[in-house]
Image (cartoon, rainbow, N blue to C red):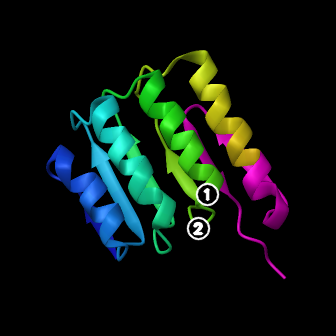
Amino acid sequence: GMVVCEKPDEVAATVEADEAHEVIAWNLELKDAGALKVAEALKSNKQTKKLVLYKCSIRAAGAIALAEALEVNTTLKEFDWTGNEIGIVANQRIRDVWTRTRLAWSDKIEVTGGREWTQPKFS
């Protein structure tokens, strides 16, 4: 199901538990340290399809760690990192990884602001 995290520590713990299909964090002071923990947890996660880290005080270092995690994790289909001051380089890094790792099984990738998701394939 969906888990809406109440505290910064819950985000990585929820991703690590690998049971929720959606993990949502809004306005939590995750910062880079928290983002690094989420990134580590993502590497072994097989269940989570949607991750929202909205206004979580993540900067470039945290975002680059998340981008690296997306190289390993291919389960995630929707990622929203809106409202974080991650800068142009990190932003591009996430987009590059997302496009490279997810285009193989998706016809089209939508990109709007700080969100990425893959459109479901209808056969």
Tell me: residue 86, above or below residue 17: above
User: Looking at the image, which residue is at 47% across and 74% down?
Assistant: 47
Image quadrant where residue 119 sits: bottom right
Q: Quadrant of the C terminus?
A: bottom right
Secondary structure at badge 2 equals loop
What residue sits right under mark 2 in the picture?
75
- Residue type of the residue flagged with mark 2: Thr
Instruction: Judge whether residue 24 is colored magenta.
Output: no
Instruction: Judge whether residue 113 is colored magenta.
Output: yes
Judged left or right of residue 56, residue 106 is right
Tell me: residue 55, above or below residue 36: above
Q: Position of residue 20 (x, y in %)?
A: 35, 72
- Residue type of the residue flagged with mark 1: Val
User: Looking at the image, which residue is at 46% across and 68% down?
Assistant: 45
User: Looking at the image, which residue is at 44% across and 54% down?
Assistant: 51
What residue sits right under mark 1 in the picture?
72
Q: Position of residue 52 (x, y in %)?
A: 41, 49
The range drawn in magenta is 100-123
Q: CA distance from mark 2 to mark 1?
A: 9 Å
Residues 66 and 117: in front is 66
Residues 13 and 86: in front is 13
Q: Give the numbered dot on residue 37.
A: none
Judged left or right of residue 2, residue 75 is right
Q: Position of residue 70 (x, y in %)?
A: 59, 51
Residue 88 visible to an observer of this rendering: yes
Secondary structure at badge 1 equals helix
